[in-house]
Structures are given as C-alpha cells and as structure tokens.
Amino acid sequence: MKDRLTELLDKYWQGESSLPEENELRILLKETDSYPELNEFFSGIDQLAQMDMGTIQPEKSRRSVFGFFLKIAAVFIGLVIIGGLIYSDYHHRQQEKAFLQVMEAFALIQTNMEKGTTELHIMSEMHHLNKAHELFNRNELKE
Amino acid sequence: MRKLLTLVVLLTLSGTVRAQDDAIVKFFSKYMEDDRFSRVFISPKMMQMAGGFLKSDAATADPDSKDLGELIAKVRGIRILSAEKVNGKTFYDEAMSTLSKHKYEDLMDVADKDSNTKFMVREENGLVEELLMLSGTRESFTLLSMLGNFTYKDLNMLADKTNMPGMDEYNKGKKKNN
C-alpha cells in the first residue's frame, strides 16, 4: 500500500496523475498517518471546491436576474420620459389652441366695440369750435 | 323671522339670475342644431389653459400680456353663437325679446340702417358678471356672452389694446383666411 502511495505521489508531483489516480491517492492518504500535511492539503482543496460551488453559482444567477430587471426598468423609464414629453407637447398645443380661441373671442368684442368708439371720435373734433373764442381771449389779453 | 325673509329674498334673486341665464341658454339651444349657425363655447377649463399658455410663453413676458393674463383669469367662460348669410336683424330682435332687460344695463348701442350692435352688462356687487354682445346686420348675426367677474377697467383694456399678445397673430391669420 505504501509503495502504491509513493508511486501515486510521485506521479502527482510530476503532474502525470489522472483523476481516478488522484481520487485513489486521497483515499490512501486518509487511511495512513504518514503524510498529515498532504492529507490536510487535499481535504482543504475539497473544502474550497465545495465553497466555490456554493458561492459563485447563485451570485451568477442573481446578477442575471438583476440585469433583466434593470433592462425592464430602463425601458420603463424611457417610455415614461417619452410619454411625458409627448403629453407636454400635446398639452402645450391644446393651451395654444385655447389661447387663440380666447383671442378670437376678444377680437370679436374689440372689433364691435370699435364701431362705437370710432363714432365717438367725431366728438373730438368739437374742440375746434372753441378756437375762435380762444383767439379772441388772447387778443383781448394783449390789448 | 327676519332671517327667513332674507333667505326667501336671496332665493328669489338667485332664481331670477338663473332665469336670465336660462334665457340665453334657451336662445343658444334653439339654434344649436341649426346648420346656419356656428357655436363656440369656451369653458372655464379652456380659459385656464389659455392663461397657462400665456404664462408659459416666455416671448410675451411684457406688461400687456400681464394685463391680458389678469383679464383671462377673471373670465369664467365665453359663449358665441354666430351666423353668416342670414338676416341678422331678425335674430337680433328675437334675441332682444328673449332677454329680459331688467338685469342688463346698456353699455353701448350702435345702430344704423344696416346694422345694430349692442353691448349690455349684468352687474353684481359692483362687478360685471356678464358682458353680452348682440350684433345683427342684413347678412350676419352674432351673440356673445362673456361670464366672469371683471371691472369696467378690464373692459376698457379689452377695447383699447389692439397690441395684445396673440392679437397680431390672430389678425394675420384672419387676413390670410379672407
């Protein structure tokens, strides 16, 4: 058994051992107390391999799920922004339309009010009737 | 007892005002389905939107637009009923007979052989609640009712200012259409 163990160890250190031989080596090391450091080394490797399996895989899947939701969130935010801009533009157009309609109504009032006020402009010509009197007064003052 | 009497008087008064409104609504509804007439109703919501446009339009940030904004804020709504190629004088007389003149005071009356134009106001608590404009010629008829709470100063501003923001654009558009 010891010879087989030495033979396998030699192969292992030279990098020529196969996977079944390495498994055999582990079993043989567990059965003997000759190489305690190697025994601990292999058991440590086993533990590390188990730890790797346990930690890396779930993280990988969590990342992919997070990425998926991130994409959905980005698309949603994009849609909200585009929708907001479209609504804002539509609202502004509606406001402009309402404003022009109000101005149209105001213009109608104004045009009709002008009919009356232009007639009243004739009254402003009345002040010319006072001119002669003003001149007369001025002459009187000069005298 | 006195409180009860006051309440009865108030209810009667509000009923009369409603009856006045009804008279205009009645006239409007009578010609609502008539193809010869075009109708415009500017709701309080649209007045709000028009005010919002004026505020948002940075290019019109001048005193005139401020005055106009204040006037728009005071107007609750505008109703217009108009018709072209009709004998407007007949409709003018009909509208005048529909309206009871107790609540309306004449503001301006321009009449000649071809046309009649009348501005009337309904006042309450010193403020103009309604400006009513009736215009009838041989070829057209217009009835305009502007509801709100405005002063005569506001009406004067409306009559005087021809350079109101948006008015130029409106007039240009009108000329193009003609």
Image (spheres, coloured by chain):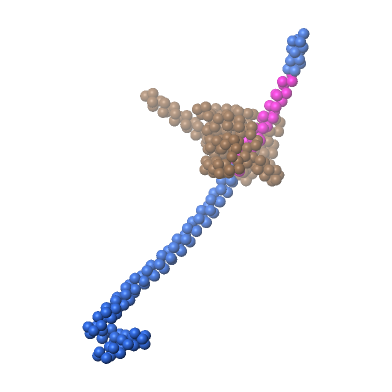
Query: Which hue belongs to chain A?
Result: blue
Relative image position of residue A49 (x, y in whole percent): 33, 76
Q: Position of residue A76 (x, y in %)?
A: 47, 59
Farthest residue to the top: give it.
A143
**Against A48, is A99 above or below?**
above
Question: Toward the viewer: A96 or A110?
Answer: A96
The C terminus of chain A lies in quadrant: top right
Residue B147 at least partly seen = no
Q: Residue at x 68, y 32 (%)?
A: A115
Quadrant housing the N terminus of chain A: bottom left
Q: Residue at x 58, y 46 (%)?
A: A96
- Above or below for B41 versus A142: below
* In magenta stretch: residue B61: no
**In this figure, what is the number of numbered marks?**
0
Residue B118: % across, % down: 63, 31
User: Looking at the rendering, which quadrant does residue B85 occupy?
Assistant: top right
Residue at (40, 25) in percent of width and height: B5
Could one spot residue A54 in this view of the protein? yes
User: How far across and how far down the image is residue B91, in percent?
Assistant: 63, 36
Which of B162/A9 is in front? A9
* Chain identifier, brown in the render: B
Q: Is residue A59 left or right of residue B171?
A: left
Give A120 or A134, whichever is nearer the viewer. Answer: A134
Q: Which residues are magenta?
A: A100-129
Magenta-drawn stretch contains A126: yes
Which residue is nearer to you in this view: A108 or A61? Answer: A61
Height in image: A80 above or below A141? below
- Specify the quadrant of the image occupied by residue B122: top right
